Image (cartoon, helix red, strand yellow):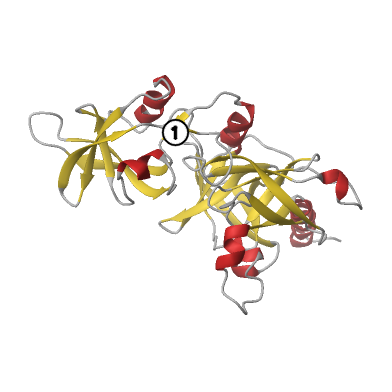
Amino acid sequence: MTSLNETIGTELDAIAGALRGVTVSVQSARSRRSAPSGRSGSGAGQGAGIVWSPDGTIVTNAHVAAADSATITLSDGRVALARMVSRDARRDLAVLRIDAGSLGGPAMRAAVMGQPSALRTGEMVLALGHPLGVEHALTMGVVHAAPQPGRSPYVVADIRLAPGNSGGPLADASGRVVGVNSMIVGGLGVAISIDVVREMLAGSAPRPTLGVQLRPVRVRIPSGAKESSVGLLVLALDPHGAAARAGIIQGDVLLGHAGRPFANGSELGTLLRDASPGTMLRFDVGRGGHRFTCEVVPGSAFSSGRRAA
């Protein structure tokens, strides 16, 4: 008689095999130049990607696809050069394309996508990538927080990630991809909802962006107004993005716009969506206990190449 453990193990093996088949290694031109010499697996450790469609469309993180081109290694060892299609540093997403027809061998198989909004706290999730150069390593954990439309685009999971997992898939218990692994915050893995990728791929018109990764935080503001407000902590910047060009640095906190504090974490997104191209935005910024105003002209979210915002 087959035991429960054997049954579960067989199912996990099947799911892991399917995920490995749609997970690729991504090594950007910049990362190859900067990779330490003599380290086995340092190329694979740069990051992973997800096969989005059989025509050769690959989705990964913007911080993984750090240059105009990247070397893609498929799960069966085939290697191809990919070009940048679009890159959005604010959402930490990039879309690459390889010529699937020139690969030879079997046709590429695309990942099966799930519904991130259907995730529940405590539900099992699986991450696949190349952590610390270990090829196609599978990690399991549970959902800590699911995406919330209009508020948070992230799947947060109590799952162990490491450098090299970035850009790889986060999947539900059925093996359907629900997120793109992006970062580790407070020991928890953070993945970008697949719904955000769908939105990015569906969008055709350029969208104003600052070129930053942000996290909402509570901040104190002077008495006379509310006791506290929402600030947006700058976790990372595209060095060629609008915010960096305006002088904003990592660790700054965006406190508000035009003298008004942010009421919630999604207010900036609304502000950017409503902004006309070339509009000057005046942000109140906190840095080291001081407050100042910074004028920023947002860039375009879908500019290709390393200068993309």
In this view, the residue in front, 173 or 261, is 261
The residue positioned 15% from the left and 37% from the top of the image is 221
> Which image quadrant: the N terminus?
bottom right
Q: Residue 191 appears at what percent x and percent y? A: 54, 47
List the single residue furthest toward the left: 224
Position above or below: 104 against 212: below
Position above or below: 46 against 200: below
The residue positioned 58% from the left and 44% from the top of the image is 305
In this view, the residue in front, 57 or 19, is 57
Callout 1: helix, strand or loop?
strand
Judging by the rendered image, the residue that carries numbered circle 1 is: 299
Q: How many marks are shown on the rendered structure?
A: 1
Identity, as a three-letter code, of the amino acid under mark 1: Gly
Q: Residue 268 appears at what percent x and percent y? A: 36, 30
In this view, the residue in front, 195 or 176, is 195
Question: In the image, 259: left or right of 207?
Answer: left
Q: Residues within 10 Å of mark 1 (few under 14, many from 20)?
A: many
Res 56 → quadrant: top right
List the single residue furthest toward the bottom: 38
Question: In the image, 155: left or right of 267?
Answer: right
Q: Residue 297 appears at what percent x and percent y? A: 36, 31
Question: In the image, 145: left or right of 61?
Answer: left
Question: In the image, 179: left or right of 106?
Answer: left
Residue 164 in view (yes/no) = no
The residue positioned 23% from the left and 40% from the top of the image is 285
The residue positioned 86% from the left and 51% from the top of the image is 103
Residue 53 in view (yes/no) = yes
List the single residue furthest toward the right: 105
Q: Residue 114 appears at what percent x and percent y? A: 67, 37
